[in-house]
């Protein structure tokens, strides 16, 4: 049985934190909220507990986990040869939604199970529940709390569905604030490179870290024979069960909705403003206001999961500007849709045909 404890996200009840920390210390798995998405955590120094995370997530063995810490001393327990630039930057950026790939401290076990990477990724989450938990349990290795390839869990209900009694505990701290994962920066190359755009925008990070390179391949899934820097880049990710495509422009999205009128098997994920223009012409799922892309980001994964529960066969999502947080939004959208961008009505018809409707 999974114990589900509702916990105050801002001022967590310490007896609940103590219970959760005891589970981690005895080798169990605890799902906990962070400011980005929920994590499924194990004692980072316990290789057997970490192996179980891979098992319950059905996670590819070569995909390493992020180690979560609660104070800067722990950074030295898990990483080695930390660049001065990073040491200085984390004093200001942490706790917060940015993860650094660093050299692994040889005292700690690798956080993937195949290639024994000598790298490790570390972050200090800006969430009272996560911080209090790690203070009592020590560093926690935690990927996002979702079955591999599925959208990350942004509320406890998502997680309960995915892990149905296969983990010891869920700390339910309500909806997560960003709804998109942390930004991952590789500090083992010069200039530093972004491996995954995320909740912390690059413009802000560059102020502390200097130039950050954005690799061309950032928004696509790599081919089988391509060797990724972040192994997670290789796999389809964040995907709803149905087929998903991106409408190239708002104008096209509007004409498509006219075309798809009364078709109950197709849904449109779009901004509130766009949904107002579409009106009752088609099934829409509102992501939030275009004037606040953070709201769109926060609702994105939940909207994917709503598609699943509505048994929608295929969905079209609006394209958002790839600036600021929009970079992370479009990165998840491109991976979830396998970079399927529709730029004409003809392509839309082909997409519908291909979806069997
Ligand atoms: O916001 C987040 O980062 C959330 C919360 C729970 O902290 N965690 C998260 O973890 O998104 P996960 O495992 O779903 O994604 C981590 C990504 C993976 O794509 C993985 O390949 C990459 O980070 N990664 C982890 N360790 C790495 C390493 N040592 N070298 C390169 N990439 C690494
Ligand atoms: Mg993940």
Image (cartoon, grey):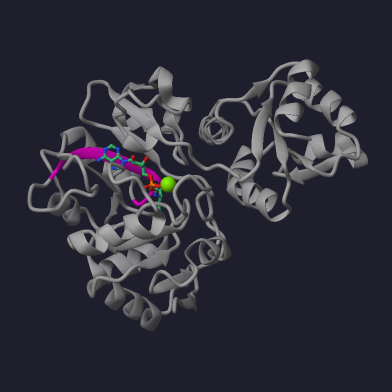
- Determine the residue positioned at 23% across, 75% down: 26
78, 151: nearer the viewer = 151
Image coordinates for residue 295, horizontal then vertical, percent: 63, 45
Quarter occupied by the C terminus: top right
Image coordinates for residue 182, horizontal then vertical, percent: 41, 43
- Give the residue at the far bottom of this rendering: 15
- Give the residue at the far left of this rendering: 107
- Determine the residue positioned at 19% across, 59% down: 47
- Give the residue at the far front of this rendering: 356
Rendering quarter of residue 209: top left
Observer able to see residue 290: no
Q: Main secondary structure of the magenta part?
A: strand
- Determine the residue positioned at 46% across, 34% down: 201
142 falls in the magenta region: no
Image coordinates for residue 311, horizontal then vertical, percent: 72, 51
217, 201: nearer the viewer = 217
- View quadrant of ligand 1: top left
Image coordinates for residue 178, horizontal then vertical, percent: 53, 49
Measured along the vertical axis of the image, is residue 93 above or below residue 253?
Answer: below
The residue segment tinted magenta is 95-104
Total number of numbered labels? Answer: 0
């Amino acid at each position: 049985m999974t114990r589900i404890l509702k916990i105050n996200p801002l001022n967590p009840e310490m007896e609940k934190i103590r219970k959760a920390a005891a589970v981690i210390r005895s080798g169990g798995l605890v799902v906990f909220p962070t400011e980005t998405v929920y994590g499924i955590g194990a004692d980072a120094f316990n290789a057997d507990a970490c192996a179980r995370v891979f098992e319950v997530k059905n996670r590819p063995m070569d995909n390493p986990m992020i180690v979560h810490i609660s104070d800067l001393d722990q950074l030295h327990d898990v990483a080695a040869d930390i660049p001065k630039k990073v040491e200085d930057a984390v004093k200001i950026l942490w706790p917060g939604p940015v993860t650094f790939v660093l050299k692994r401290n040889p005292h700690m076990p690798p956080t993937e199970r195949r290639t024994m990477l000598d790298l490790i990724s570390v972050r200090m989450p800006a969430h009272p529940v996560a911080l209090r938990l790690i203070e009592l349990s020590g560093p926690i290795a935690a990927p996002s709390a979702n079955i591999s390839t599925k959208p990350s869990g942004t509320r406890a209900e998502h997680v309960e569905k995915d892990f149905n009694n296969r983990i010891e505990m869920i700390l339910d701290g309500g909806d997560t604030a960003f709804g998109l994962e942390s930004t991952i920066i590789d500090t083992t190359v010069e200039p530093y490179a972004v491996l995954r755009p995320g909740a912390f925008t690059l413009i802000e990070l560059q102020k502390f870290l200097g130039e950050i390179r954005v690799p061309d391949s950032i928004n696509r899934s790599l081919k089988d024979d391509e060797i990724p820097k972040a192994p997670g880049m290789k796999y389809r990710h964040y995907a709803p069960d149905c087929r998903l495509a991106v409408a190239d422009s708002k104008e096209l999205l509007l004409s498509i909705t006219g075309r798809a009128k009364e078709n109950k098997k197709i849904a449109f994920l779009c901004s509130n403003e766009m949904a107002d223009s579409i009106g009752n012409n088609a099934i829409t799922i509102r992501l939030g206001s275009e004037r606040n892309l953070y709201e769109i980001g926060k609702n994105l994964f939940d909207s994917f999961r709503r598609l699943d529960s509505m048994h929608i066969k295929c969905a079209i999502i609006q394209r958002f500007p790839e600036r600021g947080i929009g970079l992370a939004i479009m990165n998840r959208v491109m991976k979830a849709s396998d970079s399927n961008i529709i730029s004409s009505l003809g392509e839309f018809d082909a997409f519908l045909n291909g979806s069997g409707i």
